[in-house]
Amino acid sequence: MSDTKETIPARTLDARGLKCPMPIVRAKKEMDTLAAGQVLEVIATDPGSVLDFQGWMKAAAAYELLKQDEGRDEQGRTIYIHLIRKKS
Amino acid sequence: MGVCDPNNCTRPYNHGQRMITTARELYQQIQARRPPLLLDVRNEDEFARWKVEGAHPVETLNLPYFAFVEDEPGSVAKVKDWLAGRAPELVVICAKGGSSEFVAEVLRGHSLSAQNLEGGMIAWGGQTVRSEIPSSPVRVLQILRFGKGCLSYVLSAGSDAVIVDPHRHMDEYGALLHEHGLRLRAVIDTHLHADHVSGAPALAQSASVPCFGHRDDFEHASFSFEPITDRAPLRIGALDLAPVRFLHSPGHTPGSTSLLVNDKLLLTGDTLFVGGVGRPDLAGKAAEWGRELHRTLQERLRPLGDDVLVLPAHSAGPQEARADGTVAAPLGALRQRNPALRTDAATFVEEAVRSAGAAPEAYARIREANMGHWSASEDELAELEFGKNECAMARRH
């Protein structure tokens, strides 16, 4: 995680406004297109996505959860940012 | 709705079969001992915190939806292993109904019969069943919000109705009043609720009728309320509903008030439940409020006759319901089996202090909302109320 190259996202998925299961369904599709070692950033507004991304990462041996952050977007909505890396 | 039209359906499977089930239907199936198998696709933490249950056992598999996203064949195989050749109705459950619909579709694609619980756990926590509690002259309807274990009541005399402890889904009460040809004359909150958003102030305002509450709970409310007078009959302007009397019963909260109806029924709010008593620790004063609660139970409630039927504002679970689905017990029976009514003050207070614990984080926000200090969108309120009520004092072991 200290290696900055690893945490710069290769792609960003805007999942704002999407309700479950869509943030993870879309993220899975994106992950399928990434090369090993690449990172996907997912920006979601669904608070349920925090625990669900953690659970998904536990269920998926090929990915790892690097980081989760909370913030606000330009419209003042609370956003949840998930950084996930494709291991292999 | 809920059944696809075989003439127009482009899906290759399950023509004419039901695709959804409602929370009320599911509850009634469980009560009738005909439960479907349940597949809960929420994450494990959410499942552990709150799940579908009823008076009779249900069999539930928890396999999160993201497992189906990640590995569809493997997850479907797990479901089939669990079914072990059984071909029952399978109901899929998630928080709001989106992920469960997704998984139900996946399962149907693998020739399994799967229905989606419409609206998910939010709907499970919001829907109700009604039962009449036979009594006169004032008639009493008990409304059980089964997923959360919240009870509200409609009292009526002739065409005049009073609603006690309404939840925030006001349309339901409007429909009920209309069905029974009743006119709403007042709304009463037995206390300041912490586990669910009260519908009392909004309901009272929409019908331009008074909202009763005890000063000790609602003194700082931002809406106007009609203060409750201890031991007084219910009067609403010129309307005298003498068979309904207030009985201040502090302890769970300082303003908690019970209602004695027809001298036969006691609406106890969160003071006394079928299986326990209201927790006195929600304000961090377990000893002080615990003492008060014991005094209420011994000096105010205990002297009422054995035949008085206790009708609480909460149920701790389906095990508290009677065979007909109502949540009620005669005071005499509670005296026999409810330890809180049998212990001395010192033991009771000690127990209250020992069992004091953290309340769900949302409870402080909900109390603020119920004082009218704060409001939010339907989604936010639903999120805030998520989960079963935790209003009873923890049980002794």
Image (spheres, rainbow, N blue to C red):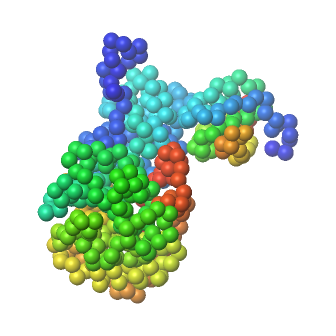
Is A49 positioned to the left or the right of B251 in the image? right
Instruction: Residue A55: tell me if it is visible.
Output: no
Q: Identify the residue at horizontal 37%, vertical 86% (top origin).
A: B345
Of residues B352 and B125, the one drawn nearer to the viewer in this rendering: B125
In the rendered view of the protein, which quadrant contains the N terminus of chain B?
Answer: top left
Residue B148, image x, y percentages = 39, 54
Identify whether B153 is placed above or below A83: below
Q: Identify the residue at horizontal 21%, vertical 66% (top origin).
A: B241
Quarter occupied by residue A10: top right
Of residues B210 and B60, the one drawn nearer to the viewer in this rendering: B210
Is B105 positioned to the left or the right of B299 in the image? right
Of residues B335 and A57, the one drawn nearer to the viewer in this rendering: B335
In the rendered view of the protein, which quadrant contains the C terminus of chain B?
Answer: bottom left
Residue B171, image x, y percentages = 35, 45
Quarter occupied by residue B293: bottom left
Of residues B38 and B329, the one drawn nearer to the viewer in this rendering: B329
Instruction: Residue B55: tell me if it is visible.
Output: yes
Q: Identify the residue at horizontal 40%, vertical 55% (top origin).
A: B205
| The furthest residue to the front | B238
Identify whether B47 is placed above or below B81: below
Quarter occupied by residue B186: bottom left
Residue B229, image x, y percentages = 33, 76
Q: Identify the residue at horizontal 39%, vertical 26% (top origin).
A: B112
Give the total number of marks visible in the rendering: 0
Identify whether B6 is placed above or below B342: above
